[in-house]
Structure formats: structure tokens, C-alpha cells
Image: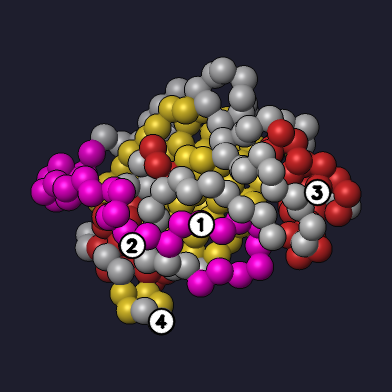
Amino acid sequence: MAFVKPCCSLGPAAVLTPFLIVLPTAGYGAEIDAPIPPRAERVSLEAESHGLQRFDTTDHSQIWFSDSLVRDLTGDGIGDTIIVLATGNHPDTLEVILRIIADGYEYKDSWTSEAYRGPEGYWDPDPLIRNMLHPNHFSRLDPDITFLSDFTLGFVAEQIGGSHSEAENALSEIRDLGMPLFSYREGYVITQVAWSPSRRQFIVLARMG
């Protein structure tokens, strides 16, 4: 199994599945302790950057929180855009969309407040969503790791439409080039994603929960 050097505090410890990466298990707020602003401030600017169209929302939805970050994720020295948008009228009924736009490509994920309900109880989605783009959520693969698990290689191979050997090459490239890893929590699931320069796509390296 491969390991990532500690990068962030994403919430209560995850129940690890046999994927690529092990995350730190400190409780949420150990490194991220930004205060939660009043609701009026949480309804921030609509997520629009680099000419991107605004997210569509239904007539009955309102923007609960939105945020964006420009950061180089592809290693070309050009800023890429990460956007988080949560719509709804209450933390219990939010719909969340995460988008990463880089080099003309897009990675997208979405979930609802129900994802924050699990065996350990219900976590308040609001602070977790608000801190999704915290700088501590970025890391890199440990340069000493190796990729030996058939499960890991199969998981990545399915995404790139290739063989285990091609998956290993893609992972080794991400490691050797020091590509940034972005970690985010969708409820009880922690996901880590990185850009593969040779495949020209984002690859999910781990989903744990």
C-alpha cells in the first residue's frame, strides 16, 4: 500500500478501504479552524471564473455557499480553477457541486447533505463545505511509494481505459513529477484526485469512507 505525507485535516477519521492512499486521521478542525460567518456572508459571489457560465439552479434553490480557487494543478505554470457550489435553504438539504477546470478539461463531482449521514452520526455539512478549498487539502505523493496492489491498479486502469501496466505508469508519472493532489470530503467519503499529464485527464487516486 502507498502512503501520502500528511496534508490536511478533512474531518473525522475515515474507515480506510484498500485504495492507494492513507490520509491523516486528526479530527476536523485540528488544522482548519476558520470561523463560520453569518448566513448572509455564506451566500457569497456566484461561482464564475475565466468566462465559465454560472451554475444553473432551480427556481426553488438558492446559493447557500460558493467559492473558487485558482491554482496550478497540471504543472504547466498556468492557474486552473476549482469551484464549489452548494445550493439549498438549509444545511440538511444542500446539493453540492465540485468542478475542476484545467487545460480545457473538466472534473466534476456532486452529492447532497445525505452524504454526511453515516454510522458515526450526522456531521454538519456547512463547515466541511466551506473549508473544501483550504490550502491544507493539497499534497503530493510520497516519492518513495510503490504501486503493488492489483486493486489500486485495477481502479486506476478502469478510469483511463488501459491495462494495469498503463495504470502503474500513470501513477508513477504523478509521483515522479510531483503533481499536486487535491483531497475533498463528500460526506463520509474522502476523495483524492490528481492530473495525469500523459493521459491528459484527472485520475481519482482514492475513495475512502
Residue 191 visible? The answer is yes
Q: Position of residue 23 (x, y in %)?
A: 51, 57
- Identity of the residue drawn at 46% across and 36% down: 82
**In this orientation, which residue lies closer to the viewer: 4 or 173?**
4
**Image: 23 above or below 105:** below
Q: Which residues are magenta?
A: 15-44
Residue topped by disc 4: 119
Q: Main secondary structure of the magenta part?
A: loop
Q: Secondary structure at mark 4?
A: loop
Q: Is residue 82 left or right of residue 43?
A: right
Amino acid at pointer 3: Ala
Mark linked to residue 167: 3
Labels 3, 2: front one? 2
In this view, which residue lies farthest toward the top? 77
Q: CA distance from mark 1 to mark 4?
A: 19 Å
Label 1 or label 4, whichever comes before in sequence order? 1
Amino acid at pointer 2: Gly
Q: CA distance from mark 3 to mark 4?
A: 33 Å
Q: CA distance from mark 4 to mark 2?
A: 16 Å
- Identity of the residue drawn at 40% across and 77% down: 118
